[in-house]
Amino acid sequence: MTPFISGIPLLDTYLAEGFDSVRGMSSRFSATICGHILRRQTEMGIRGAVAEIGTFEGRFFIAMGHALAPGEHAYGFDIFSWPDDHVLDRFVANAARCGLPSDRFTPRPFDTGKLSVDEFAGLTGRGPLRFIHIDGEHSPEALTHDLALAHDRLHPQGLICLDDMLHPGYPFLVVTVHAYLVAHPEMCVMCVIDREDIVAAPKFLICRRDVVRLYENDLMQSFAAQHFVLGGDAMGHHCVVLTPHPRIADV
Ligand SMILES: C[S@@+](CC[C@H](N)C(=O)[O-])C[C@H]1O[C@@H](n2cnc3c(N)ncnc32)[C@H](O)[C@@H]1O
């Protein structure tokens, strides 16, 4: 059986030895799959910075940072004031402890809800972003705004990754994603990455419809043991579903 790894040695070491030591809410399951995708983007020549909205103390961000290609940079946005004013210190310390060099990333202490598209572009190097993880404020208004920022900066072959979709604590947040997809019919949910736990909830991977083929077969083959073969009905698009224990209910 193919081992469940990203294929990036530095990242796989972090996932095995550092990930759980960084307080946070993203799952190792999703970080492994997203790391694999970042490696595949590099192999396909898809270049650009990566960004996260809602880094908290860096659990998922450090994973993305370890997947950067030479010359690429990671930008981490957070208000860095919840649950106290030392979140930024812990974020920077975690990155150093987990081997992410300080010149590969920049913390951005901003409320993204107050940023214009142009300000966000200026704060992310003005180039296309190949992978954007949205995990900030989970209100419909904030997610609508964060999606607008990400949509504007997304590399044509890049991915927007949305966290906490279908989280029991935010049961109607997907309505906001539905509205975004109706407004942008060129975009679709390419893959759903299932939850590990209530604090490590599912992610949606969104991309342009015309680049789905770059990702979906590879994901189904690379993560065959995690592939829920029935897939998902994502507004008419049959998306890939990856889950830690694929099965259907016994009847
Ligand atoms: C669920 S946590 C993120 C977890 C993190 N991605 C991880 O992998 O562990 C959500 C984060 O979003 C941040 N946040 C909330 N509202 C925000 C806003 N308007 N702008 C930027 N960050 C925000 C919070 O401070 C918090 O650190």
Image (tube, rainbow, N blue to C red):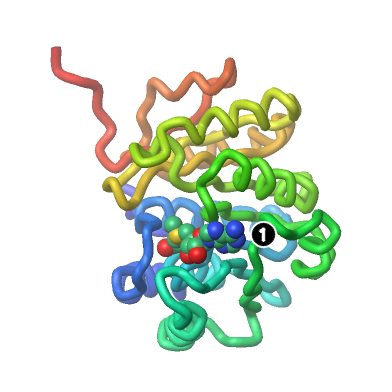
Specify whether residue 53 is in view: no
Vertical placement of 160 versus 45: above or below?
above
Residue in view at x 64 percent, y 33 percent? 213
Query: 152 left or right of 189?
Result: right
The residue positioned 67% from the left and 55% from the top of the image is 113
Q: Is residue 75 left or right of residue 48?
A: left
Q: Nearer the viewer, residue 148 or 7?
A: 148
Location of residue 130 with respect to 14 vertically, above or below? above
Sort mark 1 into few (<14), some (14-19) or many (20+) by Cα contacts within 10 Å. Answer: many
Spot the residue most to the top.
Answer: 251
Could one spot residue 40 in this view of the protein? Answer: yes
Q: Who is closer to the viewer here, 84 or 250?
A: 84
Report which quarter residue 15 is drawn in. bottom left
- Does 141 appear above or below 22? above
Under 8 Å from ligand 1: the CB of mark 1?
yes
Disc 1 marks which residue? 112
Assign a secondary structure to mark 1. Answer: helix
Q: Does 199 sit above or below residue 228?
A: below
Amino acid type for the residue under numbered disc 1: Thr
Check the picture and name the quadrant holding the C terminus. top left
**Rendered location of residue 1, percent (x, y):** 29, 47
Image x and y of residue 55, in percent: 52, 66
Residue 206 in percent (x, y) is at 61, 39
The quarter of the displayed image where residue 11 is located = bottom left
> Residue 47's x, y, as percent?
74, 61
Question: In the image, is 212 to the left or to the right of 198?
Answer: right
* Residue at 70% in and 30% down: 209
